[in-house]
Image: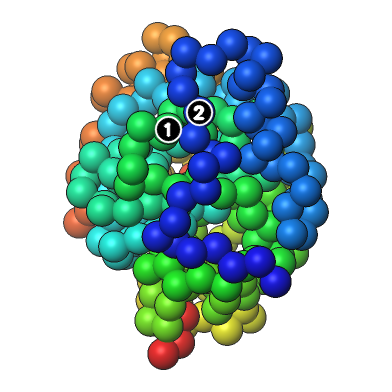
Amino acid sequence: MHTIDPKKRPDSDVVTDDRSSKVEHDVVDTVTAEPAVPLPTALGDSALQSQTLESVAGAVNYHEWLTDLALPFLGDHPMELGSGLGDYAQRWLAAGIPEFTVTEVDPSRLGVLSRRFADEPRVHVEPIDILNPPAAEYSSLVAFNVLEHIPDDVGALRAAHTVVRPGGAVVMFVPAFEFAMSKFDRAVGHVRRYTVSSMTTTMQAAGLTVEQAKYVNIPGLAAWFVGMRLLRMTPGEGRLLATWDSQVVPRARRWEDKHRAPFGQSVFAVGRVPR
């Protein structure tokens, strides 16, 4: 089994921003070529996934809320599963995380991550199959809107016993409630949505000790159900997103900071690898 040293950054992951598209393609191939274990194919429309990540990047208050939820549990060197375009990693680094490993199975997004963090010595870029992970001792495993893409979610969480040091956190943020499953969910590769109960059960089945599990973003559930399920919209930037982020999100965050939400658009859960 190939072992990744969390302190070592492979030279093949470093790309400069001034390379041509031809060189970019070559670098992506180099990063992902012939890993010790062949990487799985990401479920869903990869282009739509990346387009959506780009279009909602302007939701500053929303992303700050989620960043702050996870930050206390990450430790000194987290590994993020499915880092996308690297927006959350960038925020956690700005908040003071001293070292960070980002991962992707999608070649195009892996290339984006390599270029984005090429000049950031605190960041390591890794292709990884979470169902056949290399041995490591990260301080935590964090994944935002990733676990719902993985058919064997218990197996993915069980990998924490291999990649996270004993006592480390497993931090998951996933979409909530099957009744909100939309055409868009299926298009981007979601195989399920969760409840607090099902997320707790999944973590326990993976041998993790559940520290907390709660709903997040009460108004977002209704908005998602109407917009995505009934009207079949696609998340995107614009006046509606800007208004939602500036007016609704801060109010929802203040209320949920003081009260336990009875439901929400998402589930936030923290488990621990037993000591």
**Left or right of residue 179: residue 6:** left
Is residue 50 depicted above or below 236 in this figure?
below
**Left or right of residue 41: residue 101:** left
* Residue lying farthest to the bottom in this orientation: 275
Q: Hey, what amino acid is under mark 2? A: Val
Is residue 60 depicted above or below 104 in this figure?
above
CA distance separating discs 1 and 2: 5 Å
**Res 15 label:** 2
Quadrant of the image containing the C terminus: bottom left
Whole-percent x, y for residue 44 in the image: 76, 36
**Res 46 label:** none
Secondary structure at badge 2 equals loop
Is residue 105 depicted above or below 157 in this figure?
above
Whole-percent x, y for residue 177 in the image: 60, 52
Secondary structure at badge 1 equals loop
Question: Dividing the picture into quarters, in which one does residue 112 lie?
Answer: top right
Q: Hey, what amino acid is under mark 1? A: Ala
Question: Dividing the picture into quarters, in which one does residue 168 lie?
Answer: bottom left
Residue 261 visible in rendering: no
Residue 110 visible in rendering: yes
Whole-percent x, y for residue 163 in the image: 53, 70
Quadrant of the image containing the N terminus: bottom right
Give whichever of 40, 190 is nearer the camera: 40
Whole-percent x, y for residue 126 in the image: 56, 49
**Left or right of residue 256: residue 58:** right
Q: Which residue is mark 1?
A: 118
Is residue 131 depicted above or below 54 in this figure?
below
* Circles 1, 2 touching at the beta carbon (< 8 Å): yes
**Left or right of residue 157: residue 107:** right
